[in-house]
Image (tube, rainbow, N blue to C red):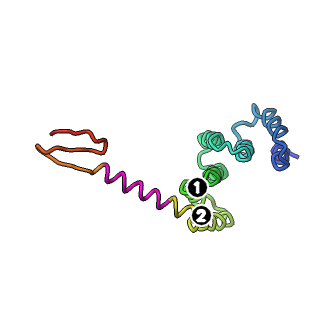
Amino acid sequence: MSYIDEILNAVKSNDFDAALKMIEEHRAEHEHEPEFITVQVMLCLQAQEYDTALNLLHDGLKRHPGDVDLLYNVGHVYQAMGNLKQAIENYENVIKLTNDSTSITELNQLCTDIKASQEYKKQTESNNRLIEELKKGVFVELGCGDSKTKGFTGINRYD
């Protein structure tokens, strides 16, 4: 059994102390390997340490740009955080990069399911409202020449 399998078994058994101990034992030798990063991310997800998981994944992607497993896991973390738009963006990037037809089919279905969810619809509506409010604020009063101009900050300026 590989060290990865041992760590995964510990995580699946909720033996987080053993998983952490094994991660520390293997860190120096394997810390930049995508599989090692992935098992650390799984542990972070169990502990709801989403920012730590994203940091691990982004560091891993700097060393392994385009690694589909790391990109998929970024999407998975965003989905766990409830940031569905970013989850979909990452899943769609994986679809573009992979040649595995099964993964493509599964990810397309996952994206479709997320887009159909009520939470995604609420987030999209909320984002659209925020964008419209920002647009209104930015373009409250625009003038030129001698006219008074007021930007979204409320600062009065004279040309």
Residue at 39% of width from left, 54% of height from top?
131
Is 137 rendered above or below residue 103?
above
- The type of residue carrying mark 2 is Ile
Residue 11 location in percent, x, y? Answer: 81, 46
Residue at 75% of width from left, 37% of height from top?
30
The one nearer the camera, 129 or 97, is: 129
Residue neighbourhood size for the residue with mark 2, other residues' Cα within 10 Å, grouped as few (<14), some (14–19), many (≥20):
some
Query: Within the magenta stretch, is there residue 130?
Result: yes
Q: Where is residue 4, by image quadrant?
A: top right
Residue 138 location in percent, x, y? Answer: 30, 49
Report how many numbered discs are placed on residues in the image.
2
> For residue 42, which numbered disc appears in the image?
none
Residue at 74% of width from left, 44% of height from top?
43
Residue neighbourhood size for the residue with mark 1, other residues' Cα within 10 Å, grouped as few (<14), some (14–19), many (≥20):
many
The one nearer the camera, 124 or 133, is: 133
Look at the magenta stretch and give its main secondary structure. helix
Quadrant for the C terminus, please. Answer: top left
Q: Where is residue 20, by image quadrant?
A: top right
Determine which residue is flagged by label 1.
87
Q: Where is residue 17, by image quadrant?
A: top right
> For residue 114, which numbered disc appears in the image?
2
Q: Which residues are magenta?
A: 124-137
Residue 81 location in percent, x, y? Answer: 62, 50
Mark 1 in CB contact with mark 2 (< 8 angstroms):
yes
For residue 108, side relative to residue 31 (left or right): left
- Secondary structure category for the residue under label 1: helix
Mark 1 or mark 2: whose residue is earlier in sequence: 1
Residue 45 location in percent, x, y? Answer: 70, 47
Query: Within the magenta stretch, is there residue 93?
Result: no
Is 68 rendered above or below residue 59?
below
